[in-house]
């Protein structure tokens, strides 16, 4: 198989970083990203993007530490590079440089891709609940405010991490909420006022913040992140699938580590496909 065709479904931080890792790990692959939404309309756009270790109870702790360490090392190198000020667009520009195609498409069933692609990578976040019927996946709703307050340079986070002020390159993120099982993507006016008041009590100068925008996202939560190979099969035809979803409240913090692991699983799928095609020739 000269140039295996890989479809990555999903264009949040997990889909884009996985697509990038696949192009780095398997340069002979032709990689296409398919997604019904792109930035700025994904959960990943709502996040403050802080690197904070989160625990996934059913993922072995050594694996979580490895994911976090790889992500930290990767982002630390970018922050020390000439591209640091453009870090926000690093993923997309990296993919474009690698010749990755991106198309808007809602995938109703992974099997619908079997005649177009050799391998499918599922990075659909909360969308995996419907796409692959994963009942272990549940939303943890988060509402935040994105405000213009360029004088705020340092982050503040209260004891349980529910109230926080995280300055970013363009906006300051004020949070937040953690509502398990809530699917509502509509901003709640009472919560908006509550978040603003809580943050102003930590940093009174925020009373002067401007251009206040309310954002809501559903953290795709699971007891363990699903980074796993699966082979779908219908009528003797097989489709190798690699899953990479369920990062809950820590997608940014472990994205590079899980993306690298998913890319290695794609490599394994390619070896298996090459093995079966050379056996078929004999
Ligand atoms: P998403 O960003 O939701 O991307 C999923 C993609 O799949 C989307 O492009 C979607 O359109 C696509 N898709 C879904 N279904 C289909 C389908 N059937 N067909 C085609 N495309 C499909 N994490 C941190 O590490 N640090 C933080 O500071 C942090 N803060 C957060 C604050 C809030 C308020 C929230 C809500 C989350 C926060 N997180 C944080 C968590 C982080 O945002 C998530 O873990 C991460 O965004 C998950 O990324 P994802 O790519 O899996 O999902």
Image (spheres, rainbow, N blue to C red):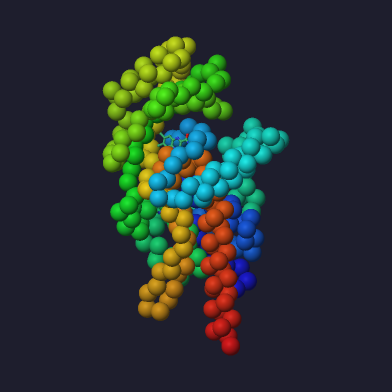
Rendered-image quadrant of the C terminus: bottom right
Q: Relative to residue 228, is residue 71 depicted above or below?
A: above
Which is more toward the observer, 160 or 43? 160
Identify which residue is drawn at 52% across, 49% down.
62
The quadrant where ligand 1 appears is top left
Residue appearing at x 32%, y 52% in the figure? 136
Q: Give the percent coordinates (x, y) of residue 193.
A: 33, 20
Q: Position of residue 200 (x, y in %)?
A: 41, 15
Location of residue 187 in the rendering, given as x and y in whole percent from the top left corner = 32, 30
For the point 55% across and 21% down, the residue is 154
Q: Residue at x 36, y 16 (%)?
A: 197
Whether 189 is drawn above or below 10: the answer is above
Q: Is residue 175 visible?
A: no
Looking at the picture, tell me which residue is in the foreground, 192 or 229: 229
As drawn, which residue projects farthest toward the right? Answer: 82
Quick check: 99 left or right of 194?
A: right
From the viewer's perspective, tell me whether residue 162 is left or right of residue 16: left
């Amino acid at each position: 198989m000269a140039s295996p065709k890989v479809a990555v479904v999903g264009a949040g931080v997990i889909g884009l970083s996985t697509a990038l890792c696949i192009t780095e790990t398997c340069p002979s692959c032709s990689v296409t990203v398919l997604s019904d939404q792109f930035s700025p309309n994904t959960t990943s756009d709502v996040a403050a993007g802080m690197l904070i270790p989160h625990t996934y109870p059913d993922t072995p702790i050594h694996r979580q530490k490895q994911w976090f360490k790889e992500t930290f090392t990767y982002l630390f190198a970018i922050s020390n590079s000439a591209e640091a000020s453009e870090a926000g667009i690093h993923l997309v520009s990296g993919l474009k440089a690698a010749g990755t195609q991106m198309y808007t498409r809602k995938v109703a069933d992974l099997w619908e891709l079997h005649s177009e692609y050799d391998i499918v990578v599922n990075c659909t976040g909360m969308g995996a609940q419907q796409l692959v019927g994963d009942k272990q996946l549940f939303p943890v709703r988060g509402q935040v405010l994105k405000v213009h307050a360029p004088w705020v340079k340092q982050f503040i986070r209260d004891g349980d991490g529910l109230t926080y002020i995280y300055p970013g390159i363009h906006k300051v993120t004020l949070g937040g909420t953690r509502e398990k099982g809530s699917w509502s993507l509509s901003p709640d006016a009472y919560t908006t006022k509550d978040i603003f008041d809580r943050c102003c009590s930590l940093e009174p100068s925020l009373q002067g913040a401007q251009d206040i925008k309310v954002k809501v996202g559903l953290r795709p939560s699971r007891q363990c992140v699903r980074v796993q190979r699966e082979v779908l099969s219908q009528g003797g035809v097989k489709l190798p699938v690699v899953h990479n979803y369920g990062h809950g409240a820590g997608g940014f913090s472990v994205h590079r580590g899980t993306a690298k692991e998913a890319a290695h699983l794609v490599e394994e799928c390619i070896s298996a496909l090459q093995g079966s095609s050379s056996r078929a020739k004999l």
